[in-house]
Image: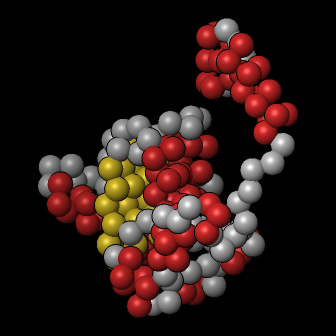
Amino acid sequence: MLVLYIIMNHENTEVTHLAFMALAVKCADDNLKTGNGGPFGAVVVKNGEVIAATPNSVTATNDPTAHAEVNAIREACKKLGTPDLEGCVMYTSCEPCPMCASAIYWAKISAVYYANTKADAHSAGFSDAFIEQELSKPLNERDIIFKRIDAADAIKSFEKWVALSEAEKAGIKNGTL
Ligand SMILES: [Zn+2]
């Protein structure tokens, strides 16, 4: 069943922010009962209406990318029928990790409000500091091997893309091709 939460308090911005954050925190708390994932929750709001309110579901889905923010972006994009969440606001119970922060940029979310900090997460045993450290290193110094191979074939995909007409490129990007 599709459930849309509408919080009617647009005149008091601070109260509205807190109400949406409370929903994100509830998603996080609920995971402590279900065991579906870590205690993280995220909400996507558009024009004062909750489009998605999702917990972390890494454990339940065996999906290491199923962080609360990524889940909220996926659900919001699915409901709105677009990969572009410009104009949407995210409320998340914790400062986003590098993966979720990247997803937020790809989705073009306009603003992010968070509650717990990365330091709070670290204290609770959920540190992402190692990822930021790795990403700041040159490829050949990282713990995971990143090595360029077979570029001669891969570049052909880009060459074919560049050769397409602007209409064909637009069709692929907006799903109308
Ligand atoms: Zn994350």
Q: Which of 99 and 62 is in front in this view?
A: 99
Quarter of the figure that contains the N terminus:
bottom right
Tell me the quarter of the picture where residue 174 sits: top right
Q: Which residue is pictured at 22% across the width and 54% down the height?
A: 9
The percent position of residue 117, horizontal first and vertical second, equals 34, 76
Q: Which residue is pictured at 73% across the width and 66% down the height?
A: 145
The percent position of residue 132, horizontal first and vertical second, equals 48, 69
| Residue 55 visible at all | no
Is residue 175 placed above or below 75 in the rendered structure? above
Q: Nearer the viewer, residue 111 or 21?
A: 111
Q: Which residue is pictured at 49% across the width and 81% down the height?
A: 127
Q: In this view, does 30 lie to the left or right of 140?
A: left
Total number of numbered labels?
0
Q: In this view, does 58 lie to the left or right of 96?
A: right
Q: Which residue is pictured at 46% across the width and 51% down the height?
A: 104
Colour scheme: secondary structure
Quarter of the figure that contains the C terminus:
top right
**View extreme (left): residue:** 12
Q: Is residue 177 left or right of residue 70?
A: right
Tell me the quarter of the picture where residue 157 sits: top right
Q: Nearer the viewer, residue 59 or 156?
A: 156
The percent position of residue 74, horizontal first and vertical second, equals 59, 51
Is residue 110 placed above or below 63 in the rendered structure? above
Is residue 67 placed above or below 84 in the rendered structure? below
The percent position of residue 6, horizontal first and vertical second, equals 37, 52
| Residue 86 visible at all | yes
